[in-house]
Image (cartoon, grey):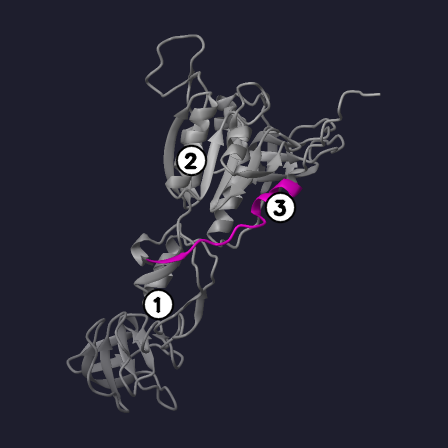
């Protein structure tokens, strides 16, 4: 006796994420000028090549002197020279002597304290200290910021502007960085036209996914190659996949054709081109038909065609792929705690990523789900600033209940 075959269960999001990121080797290291390093990921730990500052430096404009055993105020000293930034005094300071010194000037040998000029009076070659101060005051000791050999930045760190400043100050002109992943993007569908090229046909859809996906990939450090629109045909789809491989693409991202309809050709085309699918159909909303596979040096991430589904799935799966390929030390799903601003019904078998707006009340992040959660609604996606996570089988939740969110980039 035969019956309708049972459908394979949908893969949980956590299992899919683990499979997708499991065998991702870090890309090769390349040496990059520090000026071009922001947003890139360090491939090796970075240590200081010099001390900062390299000598005892004055933190203020004033006078450097040798602090006596007992400081009797007023104390008059003989001014024997001057030290300014980049122009050090070439002598030494003895008892009863001082040098005029400016911020960033090297404290000369023999001196150990700087009195600010406002607390002195000057007459000719004599200066009188008029206010008591502690020994060592206003002196930045050599290595005050960091000493030569100090570990400054770890491997796997994505460099921000402050990191680049630190690396430059530590005398690094060239940095070892992970190569940028090469991401190729295609969008499939006979109905698609580029912005500005619509003719008014009711069946036309202006392509948008490729632009959002490319922007996400670039923000994650990738080099993006737009492989163009692919019409619904097996030959055309296979040709696009083959071209991506020829271009040395590390991650091929497709949008559309990921389901099981007659015009959904991405899965069979990938298989025909030697891409073994490890993931297909995930228990999430939006984005159930997502798929992932690998063949040779290329990985393929097949996203749904609906724009919101494509974007959400790229946040959940493409960004971790790019992060791991660059060796970034970051969580696969970077969530933050918040509280619900709206009551939520019990959830079904799929993990929900609800588009929401954040409000802050008494320092607490409050997530307010948007009214329209349709996976075609780009206007709603654009107004969201986070994804509110509702686990599969989550019970009803009240206003004020704790929740987890994924912040979206501005």
- Circle 2 sits on which residue? 242
Q: Earlier in the sequence, mark 1 or mark 3?
A: 3
Measuring 58% from the left and 21% from the top, which residue is drawn there? 374
Q: Quadrant of residue 92?
A: bottom left
User: Mark 2 or mark 1: which is in front?
Assistant: 2
Q: Gap between marks 3 and 2, in whole Å?
A: 27 Å
SS under mark 2: helix
Counting from the top left corner in percent of width and height, residue 44 is at 44, 63
Counting from the top left corner in percent of width and height, residue 45 is at 45, 65
Counting from the top left corner in percent of width and height, residue 59 is at 32, 70
Q: Residues within 10 Å of mark 1 (few under 14, many from 20)?
A: many
Measuring 52% from the left and 28% from the top, which residue is drawn there? 266
Does residue 28 show up? yes
Q: Quadrant of residue 128?
A: bottom left
Measuring 35% from the left and 89% from the top, which residue is drawn there? 68
Residue furthest out toward the right: 1
Counting from the top left corner in percent of width and height, residue 178 is at 41, 55
Q: Gap between marks 2 and 1, in whole Å?
A: 45 Å
**Would residue 24 be counted in the magenta stretch?**
yes
Which residues make up the magenta segment? 14-31
- Circle 1 sits on which residue? 170
């Amino acid at each position: 006796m035969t019956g309708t075959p049972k459908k394979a269960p949908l893969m949980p999001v956590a299992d899919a994420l683990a499979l997708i990121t499991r065998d991702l080797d870090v890309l090769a290291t390349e040496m990059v000028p520090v000026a071009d390093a922001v947003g890139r990921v360090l491939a090796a730990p970075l240590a200081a090549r010099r001390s900062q500052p390299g000598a005892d430096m004055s933190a203020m404009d004033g006078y450097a002197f040798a602090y006596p055993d007992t400081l009797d105020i007023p104390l008059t000293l003989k001014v024997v020279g001057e030290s300014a930034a980049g122009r050090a005094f070439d002598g030494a300071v003895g008892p009863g002597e001082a040098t005029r010194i400016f911020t960033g000037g090297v404290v000369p040998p023999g001196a150990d304290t700087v009195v600010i000029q406002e607390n002195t009076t000057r007459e000719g070659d004599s200066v009188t200290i008029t206010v008591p101060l502690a020994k060592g005051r206003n002196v930045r000791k050599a290595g005050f910021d960091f000493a030569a050999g100090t570990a400054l930045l770890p491997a796997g760190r994505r460099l921000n502007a402050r990191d680049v400043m630190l690396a430059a100050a530590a005398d690094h002109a060239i940095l070892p960085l992970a190569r940028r992943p090469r991401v190729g993007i295609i969008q499939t569908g006979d109905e698609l036209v580029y912005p500005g090229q619509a003719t008014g046909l009711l069946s036309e859809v202006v392509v948008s996914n490729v632009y959002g996906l490319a922007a996400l990939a670039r923000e994650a450090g990738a080099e993006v190659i737009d492989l163009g629109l692919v019409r619904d045909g097996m030959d055309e789809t296979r040709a696009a996949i083959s071209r991506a491989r020829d271009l040395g693409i590390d991650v091929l991202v497709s949008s559309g054709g990921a389901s099981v309809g007659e015009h959904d050709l991405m899965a069979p085309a990938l298989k025909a081109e030697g891409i073994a699918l490890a993931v297909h159909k995930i228990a999430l909303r939006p984005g159930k038909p997502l798929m992932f596979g690998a063949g040779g040096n290329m990985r393929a991430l097949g996203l749904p065609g609906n724009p919101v589904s494509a974007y959400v799935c790229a946040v959940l799966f493409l960004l971790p792929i790019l992060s791991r390929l660059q060796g970034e030390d970051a969580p696969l799903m970077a969530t933050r705690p918040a509280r619900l601003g709206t009551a939520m019904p019990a959830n079904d078998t799929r993990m929900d990523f609800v588009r929401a707006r954040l409000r802050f009340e008494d320092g607490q992040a409050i997530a307010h789900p948007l009214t329209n959660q349709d996976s075609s609604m780009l206007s709603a996606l654009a107004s969201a600033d986070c994804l509110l996570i509702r686990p599969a089988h989550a019970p009803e939740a009240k206003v004020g209940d704790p929740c987890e969110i994924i912040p979206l980039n501005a």
